[in-house]
Amino acid sequence: MRDTKDNALIVASMENFDPVGIHTGDSIVVAPVQTLSDVDYQMLRDAALKIIRALDIAGGVNIQMALAPDSDKYAIIEVNPRVSRSSALASKATGYPIAKMAAKIAVGLSLDEIKNPVTETTLADFEPALDYVIVKIPRWPFDKFKTANRQLGTQMKATGEVMAIGRNLEEALLKAIRSLEIGVTGLNDVQYEEWATSELLAHLWPARDDRLFMLAELLRRGVTPTELHDATKIDNYFLDKLVNIVTLAQQLQQAPGDSTMLALAKRRGFADATIAELWQWTSDDVWQLRIDHDIKPVYKMVDTVAGEFDAVTPYYYATYGKENEARVTQRPSVLVIGSGPIRIGQGVEFDYATVHAVKAIQSAGYEAIVMNSNPETVSTDFSISDKLYFEPLTFEDVREVVALEQPVGVIVQFGGQTAINLAADLEKHGINILGTSVADLNRAEDRASFNQVIEKLQLPQPIGQTATTVKEAVKIAKSIGYPVLVRPSYVLGGRAMEIVTNEAALADYMSRAVAVSHDHPVLIDQYVVGMEAELDVLSDGETVVTPGVMEHIEPAGIHSGDSMSVYPPQVLSESRQAKMIAAATALARELQIVGLLNVQFVIQDDTAYVIEVNPRASRTVPFISKVTDVPLAQLATQVMLGTKLADLGYQDGVQQVPTTVAVKAPVFSFSKLPGVTQLLGPEMKSTGEAMGRAETFDVALYKAFTSAGIKVPATPGVAVLLTDDDQEAVALELAFVNAGFKTRRQCERVEQGDVLIDTRKIPVASPQADQQMTLWHDAMNKQLPVFTSAATAYAFLQAYQSQNE
């Protein structure tokens, strides 16, 4: 950081766990640096200050360096003269708000004039001091993309990240692991029983996303840290920390019920669930032993000054020690559970909802407390809420914060499936869930219970049943008729959802899907072909408000998160919309929704079938809130706190429809993930979205495409049409030719100016599939439009024509 008076400082020193060769966005990162000598650190610090001054930068800069492990030689890898991904991490790691300080410098202030917002007494012209360790671990999308190459390199593949804070590296690392929400709580949870030691060693480099677990497994097998260092070039210091964790786990396993070992394990970051597994106890048994021996967490403040000055930062992390620095006030408080790391199916839409919930809580006179583990979000800026707990979103961690703060209630509707999945355990242990009751959440999420609701309301729904075995699944599918739509219950983003066309594919699916959600059955539904639409409704238990219906451009069978959608609808009749709104209203009342409900429909032959409900904020909440000016998240929070919608000026039904048209377009990251099919289906693949808004649908389409990074040409080029359906090909060809495009029905290589439309459904793991993926990636590398749905291609053509009429 530097100002125009040439005051310059280092905000954060961060060190990659991995050696050079892995993108920093895909690397595990530790702060402050752990392995450098003071001489080396000062050398790199001096170099960084020389660079920011030589470039005459006023504001923040991110400088990446590489240091030879056996000499004082170093190299500058990259300089980013702007706020970067690492800037967000550095800000959350230190408490020093880099973007805010850079903005103040940009308007003419200097660091020796700006107050440190953490202390409110000292100035910003200082270098933060840390008395804790932070660990960042990336979150990868390989749970969604089974065929993707999991090797890490210079091309970033992660979709998000988590950060954890501890008093030692072992504690921070284990907290970060359980923050990932990948079904593990520690290094013991991933086993490689079918892998030979030689095979594991061979997979350590090039590194994969699961290298931490491989390293732990190899240490358990007796491979030495020196051998692992030779294979990976990971610093011995970090490997020694892994040895500490593995050794302590082995010692714990031999000493069930030992309170001394328990206290040590908690200081090193072990979760109750991990200890319970090692002891073959329940997590509640471990918790009770902790309580009996007064082994409880305390909360430390992230204050940027290592306790040297008084600080007012309401920013805390848990550890096991003596002094508790969290200041519990007498004001009634509300705890909002965030959504954890950004990943496919659960993105920044929940950060949006959390921030708006905080505003509503504060306006109602309550203290707003946020709990989350994601350093990339606005909601984890300590200035947003009254208090921030930067902690993993597990039952144990939430339970401890609730025990300390004693909030009047906990809001789980704005944290995606992460928060919803915590609701039952929280309520079971006497914690008040605000809004829709847990019983009604389960009625919406559990298939058998929801079917009863549908039958009671006499609403159309695709025929479907649940199965827990292959035999049951085959029997149900035969009775329904193929193709069928299959998915686990209680999942987000269509995870593990597939359209299955035969018995063999169904048996294969069942062997995989039960592992995805083993506590809940698999849902098997009739696959209904038609148009999809969805709506979000807001209810206080009496009044049900609907901002409007969102119409999907792509047909049913493509996940709603991957579909383009438009508001207000351009095809659906007003009478059909009215029936959908009536159905959603009836569902909200029957489910006794207090807060938000998302309802999705597929329309076939003028019948709107209910295909899914989500009793929480959905990814469409920011979109529909912005285009209708109905602040859904804030209103939902108000009704959860007891305010009636009628008192806020809202009545049953649809709000006034705006005169403009808005289109949402998904954004994909296929270019970063070789080996992944771009064919869209019921499992979500997009990593973000963009919106276009205009007076007309055509122009809104154009804005949506261009905002999503898809170039709409000014002049017609060549439409490459590759499809299994001759009728579809003829129709596409006619449409593009009429718009002035040339067409080509065969293609091995795309050229500049081409538009690639490839809807072929080629079996995976075939030479033809490899050729198809090569073609897609060639097109993406040339930044050409690529569409795998004919509906999207027609929308693109309409956007083109809007600019060339």
Image (spheres, grey):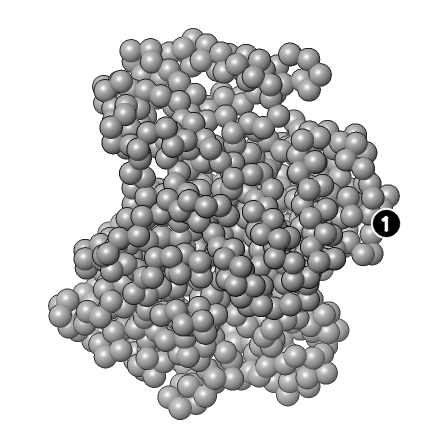
Q: Nearer the viewer, residue 453 or 681?
A: 453
Q: Nearer the viewer, residue 584 or 124?
A: 124
Residue 594 showing in the rendered view: yes
Q: Amino acid at mark 1?
A: Ala
Q: Which residue is mark 1?
A: 196
Q: Position of residue 532 (x, y in %)?
A: 43, 69
Give the residue at x 23% y 79%. 542
Left or right: 470, with 528 as reference point: right
Q: Position of residue 237 (x, y in %)?
A: 67, 31
Left or right: 110, with 667 as reference point: left
Place residue 498 in its image quadrant.
bottom right
**Image quadrant containing the N terminus:** top left
Q: Position of residue 314 (x, y in %)?
A: 32, 44
Place residue 211 in its image quadrant.
top right
Residue 756 showing in the rendered view: no
Give the residue at x 40% y 72%. 430
Q: Nearer the viewer, residue 525 or 14?
A: 14
Q: Position of residue 261 (x, y in %)?
A: 64, 53
State whether residue 600 is above or below residue 155. below
Looking at the rendered structure, the secondary structure element under dot 1 is: loop
Left or right: 175, with 518 as reference point: left
Q: Nearer the viewer, residue 798 or 150?
A: 150
Left or right: 467, with 791 as reference point: right
Give the residue at x 25% y 24%. 114
